[in-house]
Image (cartoon, rainbow, N blue to C red):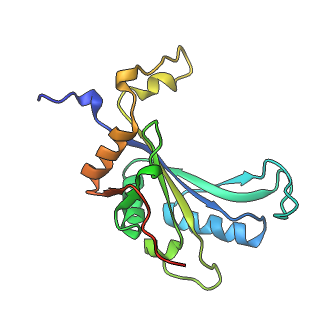
Amino acid sequence: MAENCMKEVKVHKLVLNIAVGESGDRLTKAAKVLEQLTGQQPVFTKARYTVRSFGIRRNEKIGCYVSVSGDKAIQLIEAGLKVKEFELLRKNFSANGNFGFGINEHIDLGIKYDPSTGIYGMDFYVVLERPGYTVHRRKKSPGKIGKPHRLTKDDAIKWFQTKFEGIVLNKAAFHGY
């Protein structure tokens, strides 16, 4: 075994987010969609401040998200990437080795369309890590992750290309107006 097992990249969690932009019926339906998709209870997000032009008030619930980890996360990532045809842009990857993308319709993931629910777009955000990352997350004597052990943008891109045989594009294709 020549390769270092501590350098192996793995999925820490996947965060699925639906930002509805208003509270009420549409938000509860969006939460139901996330619950249907993951089998977990979503958490509601609140507006930071009032924006009158958007018609939202401070502390009003405007979105919901759910964090998934383990095998379920990998299945959902694969389903989301299938919608994107396993193509991501270089700018989808962050400097610290995470990546995110969005889909326009949740029914593309294989959920049956329900007219009473409607169609929701959602954001996928994948947090990657290496073994030993719990060092900086623990409560007692948290440490720092050393520079050589940290994930970079290139590590995340390489992992994406090998794990999902994905394609990373430099610029988005122009589809006209």
Q: Position of residue 26 (x, y in %)?
A: 71, 72
> Is residue 54 or residue 67 the one in the foreground?
54
User: Residue sitting at 36 percent across and 43 percent down?
Assistant: 156
Residue drawn at the location 55% of the way across and 79% of the way down: 177
The vertical placement of 94 against 61, above or below, is above
Would residue 150 appear left or right of 30 to someone viewing this image? left
* Outermost bottom residue: 115
- On the picture, is 58 further left or further right than 151? right
Residue 2 falls in image quadrant:
top left
Quarter where residue 128 is shown: top left
Residue 10 position within the rendered picture, expressed as x and y whole percent measured from the top left: 34, 41
Q: Judge left or right: residue 104 versus residue 51.
A: left
Count of numbered circles on the image: 0
Q: Is residue 46 above or below residue 108?
A: above
Residue 34 placed where, x, y %? 57, 63
Residue that appears at 43% across and 75% down? 110
